[in-house]
Image (cartoon, rainbow, N blue to C red):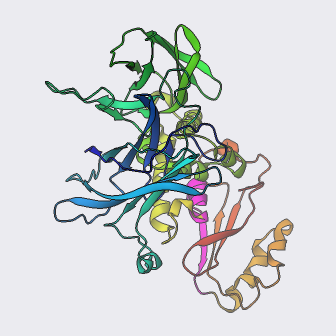
């Protein structure tokens, strides 16, 4: 499944460190192909060299590979200066072989690991990577006409000075390929990096690699849980495998008892404690955290939470968001002794219904206004639906009798809701308060008898919520 794709790029050094405005490694790509990008710097024969690691999910790639089962990709790596201007790079085509099953039904889709060895221009402040599926097709008609292919793009930077005190950057790894008889590949060459830095459900052992240069000294490490910095594990290692003046270290830590969240690993030389390197990683125990991209993970929070609570989740990492949602569901487990959360089962059933009946070609049903209302409060007791209202049934004649006095301003806006307005609409009524997932989150002064009015503004089935008598923001 893993392939090696070396790139020959413009020559240079690798001096850059902290730089505002660009996220440090690792990052997840935006777009149709949410690959992960990570990187590390090492010292070879007195020169700084770099490695970039890309983990490309197979699932978004073309559904129609060629006759040999391969998909054709375009890989681009570009370097940017402090102003964001490109100062070098390369592009190269490669083929990846798709697994016969394409991973359908598997909890984690197959991924292709690419290990790159670029030489980076001296003034580089950011690295941009783009993966494009040349064999695929975008679903939108305009994209097809323009020839736009499915793609993903990521931009990242290294942190701190390179090899500032005799230690390389950390490489978070899945495994190491066993050396064959007489094989001369180094430990680093046999390393299988983990560019996402995800551990937990499908990999309970944290494996990390780094190199020490000069006189070998024993290493110590600690793992902190973020954001507070609580130390949850620590250790040391004095064994070493010398390769000339380079001393590679491979250390493991069992994570089986650690809760979901974001963690930081720091490593230092035992006799020179000021020489430290570090990096963040995620522990994830939910299947959805492994199988969904960053935006999909936030959909659950968007549906469940109010505007203020949802805003608080925007800066969370996948591990932090999983921990937050897990605690939310734990607090609302109706029967904790059963080993399963019955309320979460109800949530899943409502999501399935919303996606089936309220979705549009532009938006998943659970993310529409009707979908969110249905998921939060269950099926309405009464639905008034007008697909092509006429005469007495148009909004302008219906709204005055449906809207409470403190919200009548919605029918006073110029150019809206007059007798010529025949947009489709729906009125949902709950005789009491419906079947809310989290009843205690209901405003205690909320009147019984909930009402929601939706209007199809653009005529393609996306009913926008224009009125509710729910107290407070929705």
Please name the residue shown 64% across and 43% down the image: 315
Q: Is residue 80 above or below residue 386?
A: above
Question: How many marks do you count on the picture?
Answer: 0
In the displayed structure image, the side of residue 245 where residue 120 appears, left or right = right
Quadrant of res 429: bottom right
Quadrant of res 83: bottom right
Please name the residue shown 41% across and 70% down the image: 138
In the displayed structure image, the side of residue 359 where residue 95 appears, left or right = left
Quadrant of res 418: bottom right
Percent x, y for residue 112? 31, 47
Q: Is residue 86 above or below residue 13?
A: below
Check residue 374 for magenta coloring: yes
Percent x, y for residue 192? 32, 34
Q: Quadrant of the N terminus?
A: top left
Q: Is residue 233 above or below residue 462?
A: above
Please name the residue shown 62% across and 44% down the image: 438
Depth order, front residue of 384/246: 246
Check residue 237 for magenta coloring: no
What residue range appears in magenta?
369-388
Q: Is residue 277 visible?
A: yes
Depth order, front residue of 258/248: 248
Q: Is residue 7 above or below residue 186?
A: below
Depth order, front residue of 336/23: 23
Depth order, front residue of 323/219: 219
Percent x, y for residue 98? 24, 54
In the displayed structure image, the side of residue 390 where residue 190 appears, left or right = left
Percent x, y for residue 110? 30, 47
In the displayed structure image, the side of residue 56 where residue 387 appears, left or right = right
Q: Is residue 75 visible?
A: no
Please name the residue shown 56% across and 46% down the image: 124
Q: Quadrant of the C terminus?
A: bottom right
């Amino acid at each position: 499944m893993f392939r090696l794709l070396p790139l020959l790029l413009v020559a240079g050094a690798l001096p850059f460190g902290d730089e505002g405005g660009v996220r440090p490694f690792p990052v997840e790509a935006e777009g149709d192909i949410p690959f992960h990008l990570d990187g590390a710097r090492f010292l070879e024969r007195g020169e700084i060299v770099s490695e970039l690691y890309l983990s490309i999910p197979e699932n978004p790639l073309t559904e129609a590979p060629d006759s040999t089962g391969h998909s054709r990709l375009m890989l681009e790596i570009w370097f940017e200066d402090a102003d964001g201007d490109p100062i070098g790079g390369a592009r190269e085509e490669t083929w990846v072989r798709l697994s016969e099953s394409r991973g359908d039904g598997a909890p984690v889709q197959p991924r292709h690991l690419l290990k790159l060895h670029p030489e980076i221009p001296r003034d580089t402040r950011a690295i941009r990577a783009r993966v494009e599926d040349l064999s695929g097709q975008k679903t939108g008609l305009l994209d097809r006409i323009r020839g736009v292919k499915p793609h993903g793009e990521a931009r990242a930077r290294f942190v701190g000075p390179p090899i500032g005190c005799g230690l390389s950057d950390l490489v978070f790894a899945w495994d190491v390929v066993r050396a064959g008889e007489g094989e001369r590949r180094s430990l680093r060459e046999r390393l299988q990096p983990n560019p996402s830095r995800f551990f937990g459900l499908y990999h309970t052992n944290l494996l990390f690699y780094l190199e020490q240069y000069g006189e070998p000294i024993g290493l110590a490490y600690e793992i902190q849980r973020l954001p507070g910095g609580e130390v949850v594990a620590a250790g040391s290692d004095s064994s070493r495998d010398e390769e000339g003046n380079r001393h590679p270290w491979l250390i493991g830590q069992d994570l089986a008892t650690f809760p979901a969240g974001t963690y930081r690993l720091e490593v230092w030389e035992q006799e020179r404690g000021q020489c430290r390197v570090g990096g963040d990683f995620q522990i994830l125990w939910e299947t959805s955290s492994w199988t969904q991209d960053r935006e999909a993970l936030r959909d659950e929070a968007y549906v469940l939470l109010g505007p203020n609570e949802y805003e608080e989740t925007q800066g969370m990492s996948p591990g932090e968001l999983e921990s937050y949602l897990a605690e939310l569901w734990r607090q609302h487990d109706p029967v904790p002794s059963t080993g399963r959360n019955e309320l979460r089962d109800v949530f899943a059933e409502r999501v399935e219904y919303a996606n089936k009946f309220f979705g549009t070609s532009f938006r998943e049903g659970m993310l529409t206004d009707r979908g969110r209302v249905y998921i939060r409060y269950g099926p309405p007791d009464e639905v008034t639906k007008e697909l092509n209202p006429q005469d007495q049934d148009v909004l302008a004649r219906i709204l005055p009798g449906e809207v409470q006095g403190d919200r009548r301003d919605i029918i006073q806006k110029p150019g809206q809701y007059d007798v010529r307005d025949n947009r489709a609409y729906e009125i949902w009524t709950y005789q009491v308060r419906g079947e809310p997932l989290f009843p205690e989150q209901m405003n205690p002064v909320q009147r019984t008898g909930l009402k929601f009015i939706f209007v199809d503004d653009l005529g393609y089935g996306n009913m926008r919520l224009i009125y509710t008598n729910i107290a407070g923001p929705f």
